[in-house]
Image: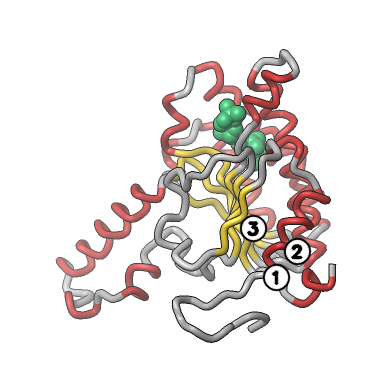
């Protein structure tokens, strides 16, 4: 626990995986797993906010998730709307600000409406920023950034020589955020799955076999404690621990 207090990551990103398996183990439909996953979201947001984490980015719906059966996609969209509606007051009480990244225009009208409403209601909060990645793909994000940079060059607003790493970072959906310090993936898969490809260059990675609906406070604290012991070098030789 001492490491947690000393070395809290500023930005935690999570690939919430394993809802389907959790449901199958219990003979439930997949959406039952997503519903249980929503309770984990609630708890992890609360803990993050209490610990003073600045950004929590959750991979809630990927570009590839549109390829799931229609019934599951519809249920996930409804669940998102339901979560936002239900949690808005609690998020507000905890001073949480909400941001969304991804091709948000692709969301269903209902989910988009709830999302816009929640973002607007929470926009002046100054505590944790909860970032929901929705219809999000890391490659699509880079494509969108390249298009925007090309448009600005064509319009004479910037020069080709101005393109550097900062310029690219500034054109991603995450433009105003620091890069994640810690990337957590639940349910044991050793994949990045098109999540924050540019931004995780130097993130510490933590993978647990625990399925997302079972990933609660104790599991989260374990991940943070593990992170606290890491020696981050950012490609250099010396330690930048506790920097
Ligand atoms: C991955 O599990 C999870 C998702 C595709 C969706 C994540 C959604 C939630 C946690 C619920 C609602 C979220 C919010 C923000 C309210 P999977 O279905 O791929 O699991 P599997 O690999 O075991 O099949």
The numbered disc on residue 58 is none
SS for callout 2: helix
Residue furthest toward the bottom? 238
Decide: few, some or many residues near mark 1? Use Cα within 10 Å; few <14, some 14-19, many ≥20.
few
Instruction: Report which residue position mark 3 lands on.
Output: 56
Does residue 136 appear to the left or right of 111 in the view shown?
left
Spatial CA span between label 2 and label 1: 7 Å
Question: Which residue occupies 33% across, 55% down?
Answer: 142
In percent of width and height, residue 148 lies at 28, 60
Q: Quadrant of ligand 1?
A: top right
Picture quadrant where residue 163 is located: bottom left
Q: Looking at the image, how many numbered discs can be counted on the residues?
A: 3
Instruction: Report which residue position mark 2 lands on.
Output: 225
Which of these two is toward me, 137 or 18?
A: 18
Spatial CA span between label 3 and label 1: 20 Å
SS for callout 3: strand
In percent of width and height, residue 119 lies at 62, 52
Q: Quadrant of the C terminus?
A: bottom right
Spatial CA span between label 2 and label 3: 17 Å
Q: State yes or no: discs 2 and 1 in contact (Cβ < 8 Å).
A: yes
Instruction: Report which residue position mark 1 lands on.
Output: 229
Q: State yes or no: discs 2 and 3 in contact (Cβ < 8 Å).
A: no
Residue furthest toward the front? 237
The relative height of residue 200 versus residue 113 in the rendered view (above or below) is: below
In percent of width and height, residue 24 lies at 67, 18
Residue furthest toward the top? 27
């Amino acid at each position: 626990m001492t490491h947690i207090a000393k070395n809290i990551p500023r930005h935690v990103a999570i690939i919430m995986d394993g809802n389907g398996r959790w449901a199958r183990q219990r003979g439930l439909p997949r959406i039952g797993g997503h519903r249980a996953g929503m309770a984990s979201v609630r708890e992890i947001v609360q803990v993050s906010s209490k610990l003073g984490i600045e950004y929590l980015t959750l991979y809630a719906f990927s570009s590839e998730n549109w390829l799931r059966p229609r019934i599951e996609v519809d249920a996930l969209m409804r669940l998102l709307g339901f979560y936002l509606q239900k949690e808005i007051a609690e998020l507000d009480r905890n001073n949480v600000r909400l941001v969304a990244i991804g091709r948000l225009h692709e969301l269903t009208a209902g989910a988009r409406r709830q999302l816009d409403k929640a973002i607007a209601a929470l926009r002046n909060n100054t505590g944790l920023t909860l970032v929901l990645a929705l219809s999000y793909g890391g490659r699509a994000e880079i494509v969108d950034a390249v298009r925007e940079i090309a448009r600005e060059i064509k319009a004479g607003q910037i020069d080709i020589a101005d393109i550097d790493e900062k310029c690219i970072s500034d054109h991603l959906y995450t433009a105003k955020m620091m890069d994640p310090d810690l990337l957590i993936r639940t349910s044991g898969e050793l994949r990045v799955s098109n999540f924050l490809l540019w931004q995780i260059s130097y993130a510490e990675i933590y993978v647990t076999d625990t399925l997302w609906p079972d990933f609660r406070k104790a599991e989260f604290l374990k991940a943070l404690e593990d992170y606290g012991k890491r020696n981050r070098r950012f490609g250099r030789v010396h330690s930048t621990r506790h920097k």
